[in-house]
Amino acid sequence: MNQKTKKGLSKVPEVTLVFWIIKIFATTLGETGGDAVSMSMKLGYLVGSAIFLAIFVLAVIAQIKSPKFHPGIYWITIIASTTVGTTFADFADRSLNIGYTGGSSVILILLLLSLFTWYQATGSISIRSVISTKSEVFYWVTIMFSQTLGTAVGDWTADTASLGYLFSAGIFGGLLLVLVVFYFTTAISRTFLFWAAFILTRPLGAVVGDFLDKPTDHGGLALNRYTASLVLISAIFLLVFIFKQKAATKNH
């Protein structure tokens, strides 16, 4: 697509408080929705991953083909990335028998490689630079790895480290607050802070999602996964409808 027609706008939203609220809801939905397909429907992690990967690829294609930022398409793609991240992480951690520590380590390496390659190819990993097909592809690949890593880290914290869902949620929520303080009081790179926050919202959503749908004897509320997912997706699209998000402006 001719970048001149984009008038300096990327196809991702401005980062606002509403953005982060929707992102946390989406990551929580990724956990309940991914578990609903792989566990409640008993399709398994591999089949669940294949289903969500196909949805994610189709959503990314729609996002890339869209001539401008479209909130609905963008958040559908985010939801697809977080559900495939859930099933991918569960497949790596459990089906491949490498555990949460091994899975988290492998996915972290993939995420760092994605960010490094993106920077080498385009010169920037800022969301404001997402104005070309190449940068969009890197953006969505990086997001998929970040969602997968977040799931693995959330599971490691709650299960391997035996901290439980609520305590783990407190840890990740606290770390996000630290990033907020850094944002307002320091000159730390905004791009670094964005990706750090983006990654941290995923394990927060993972442990909150697990808290909602895991059995009570495992520390959860044992809520129906389908009901929880429906409530979350309704809340997301209500927020998208009410708050008119704008595209991030391009750096000059």
Image: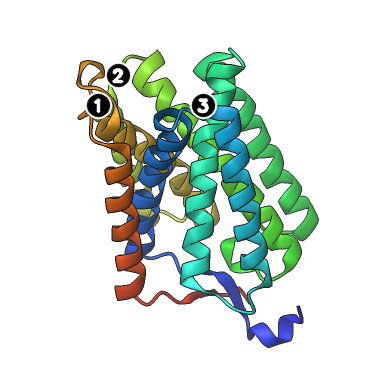
Give x and y (percent) for residue 220.
23, 26
Distance from Cα at disc 1 to Cα at disc 3: 21 Å
Residue at 52% of width from left, 50% of height from top? 80
Say which label, 1 or 3, has the lower sequence index: 3
- Judging by the rendered image, the residue that carries numbered circle 3 is 90
- Judging by the rendered image, the residue that carries numbered circle 2 is 163
Give x and y (percent) for residue 110.
67, 35
- Please, what is the three-letter code of the amino acid marked with disc 2? Leu
Color scheme of the displayed model: rainbow
Distance from Cα at disc 2 to Cα at disc 1: 6 Å
Mark 3 in CB contact with mark 2 (< 8 angstroms)? no
- Judging by the rendered image, the residue that carries numbered circle 1 is 167
Nearer to us in this view, 1 or 105: 1
Residue at 43% of width from left, 21% of height from top? 156
Image height of 60 relative to 149, above or below: below
Q: How many callouts does the rendering have?
A: 3
Secondary structure beneath disc 2?
loop
